[in-house]
Image: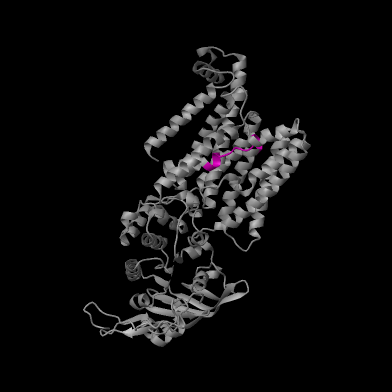
Amino acid sequence: MKKRSSIILVLFFLFSLFVSLCAGRFPIGMGGIARLVLAGLGLEEVFGTPLHEMQLIFWNIRLPRIIMSFAVGCGISIAGAVFQALFRNPLAAPDILGVTAGSCFGAAAAIMFFSGMTVAVQCSSFVFGVIAVSLAYLLATRSWDTSAAVLVISGIVVSAFFQAGLSVLMYIANPYDQLAQIVFWIMGSFHASSWAKVQTTLPIVAAGSVLIGVFSWRLNMMTQHEEQVLSMGVDVFRWRLFYIGVSTLMVASSVASVGTIAWVGLIMPHIARYLVGPDHKRLIPTTAFLGGTFLMFMDTIARSILANEIPISIVTSIFGAPFLGYLVMKRREVGVNDELAH
Amino acid sequence: MSLHIENIHAGYGKANVLDDVSLQVNQGCICALMGRNGSGKTTLMRCINAMLKPSRGRVTTMGLDITRLSRLEIARLVSIVPQSSDTAFPFSSMEMILMSCANRIKAWSAPSSREHARARLVLDELEIGHLSDRPFNQLSGGERQLVMLARALFQDTPVMLLDEPNAHLDFAHQHAIMELMRGVVKKRGVTVLIILHDPNLVLYYCDRVAMMKKGRIVTEGPTVDVMNDRVLREVLGNGIQMEVTRKGRRVVTPRARVTKNISLLPDADQESEPCDVRTANGTVS
């Protein structure tokens, strides 16, 4: 990575972290942050004891929310980079195999039939996300064609199936409470973040990120045509299953906790690729760091810019869609190196 | 380190493409596979590389049955240069080449600085060191083929398969690739099986040739013995003929007045004049 890019990335992270810690309906200044951190370390005598409400908001609401947004951003961005490599398509996103559609269906079903119990929504969302990807994979393995294109088609079929199921649920949902809950959940939000959610999501995302990071160089090969990968001694089918499995777990656990997050998994790998090139050894950590920082910043905007919280997917779409447009225009200018055209 | 193909039968589904194919290619030899489209050349290569499992017969190299080996073990014995290649992401030529060391490094490792140095040596061997940092998808067709050849060489296998490496290349690049292959075989002693459509390239550069027709090897042997007018017409059709220059060099040219068997010629009724092959000093050869 160019030194300047690294510095910009670190500065962006520090700025986002600072803004995220300070901004919100209960603004906390730099002094307040220092006081809270020192108090947390048992050094109250340095700056004095902070207000109880401030402590409550900082430790129980803001900090878990910042950690969740960073972890989910990391997980979804890494999954995006992995799926783009596996499907040899820079426009692939983590939900390409139906994980998001399955999770949404699972969450909507739990909202309707379990009165929206948080644990039920999370479990059901996670389980249906994994079921959706398993179905897509199973469907693809039944085909005589073993190419990645068949997997994509299977993903589209499964997504359509679960989206139809979701539509049925929304159609029969009580429009005064259940429907609003489903729609809000689908648009995603970190407002319900808690240490309990951090405890269920962070270990999966952290373990998945480490696993993908360790085997990141192999992803370079997965971008080549199947027969070429096989001829280089890599069991493409086994490795594809590994990468899809780990990425799906990361996405499903994220979506189960906070709902769907649009654009992050698609856009972040592009920016990271622009910064460090396509080699996944450098791309994966950069994407993770960038994705985490970006989502942390977007969540701060979502919760601070208006009096009411905006669903996170609206904010990420507002920033993501124009960025994709910019990428397309830029590629047109560059001409030959048109990676989006592949 | 020779390559033995013994009584191979293979196909796709119920369609049998290869019918009792046997071939032996010795170490340090370039053997060409020739035949019309659909004669089974690529299917044979896929069997050698274990991409397609033969229904009968076996392929052995260094005494090892390819069909019984793991992908990793096969990748240590056989490398392949595909007909064409592209990549969805702008990997540099060096990154493309480094991928083929996957057959000798741990799954969690990335290529070491030693592997980088070795890859640079291969690039220098093929005289394409200047392409090292250039994005692969910005290279010309010829340059891409050279990079893919470098990748196969970097894989460091005793057997190399080249599937029409000259397809889409201009005249100069076609000969450049073949010259390079001759040099590589001489230096490294690898066994090369190459699919070619141009009989003149086979005559100039290949030690042996196997002529395929309808899934069978019609004839096989040293190029000088096998390549004659009769065999060429039998395998490739009546549209070509072999001529011998005054210097004794054999060249294959399109056959005049014969158009019936070449359905792709635009005006089948129109008679054409016989074309002469002229040397640089103007003599008809």
Residue A103 visible in the picture: yes
Q: Nearer the viewer, residue B145 or B57?
A: B145
**x 41%, y 36%: residue:** A6
Q: Nearer the viewer, residue A329 or A224?
A: A329
* Figure disc tally: 0
The image position of residue A32, as x and y in percent, is 53, 16
Q: Nearer the viewer, residue A183 or B273?
A: B273
**x 37%, y 37%: residue:** A3
Would you say A122 lies left or right of B139 here?
A: right
Q: What's the colour scheme?
A: one colour
**x 66%, y 55%: residue:** A138
Q: Nearer the viewer, residue B198 or B114?
A: B198
- Position of the C terminus of chain B, as image quadrant, is bottom left
Instruction: Examine the rendered structure and indicate whether residue A285 appears above or below residue A68.
Output: below
The image position of residue B60, as x and y in percent, is 50, 73
Q: Any magenta on residue A263?
A: yes
Instruction: Examine the rendered structure and indicate whether residue B217 appears above or below residue A202.
Output: below
Give the residue furthest to the front: B270
- Position of the N terminus of chain B, as image quadrant, is bottom left
The image position of residue B87, as x and y in percent, is 46, 55
Give the residue furthest to the left: B281
Name the image quarter holding residue A101. top right
Residue A118 visible in the picture: no
The image position of residue B73, as x and y in percent, is 50, 64
Q: Any magenta on residue A140?
A: no
| Residues rendered magenta in the picture | A256-266
Would you say A131 lies left or right of B93 here?
A: right
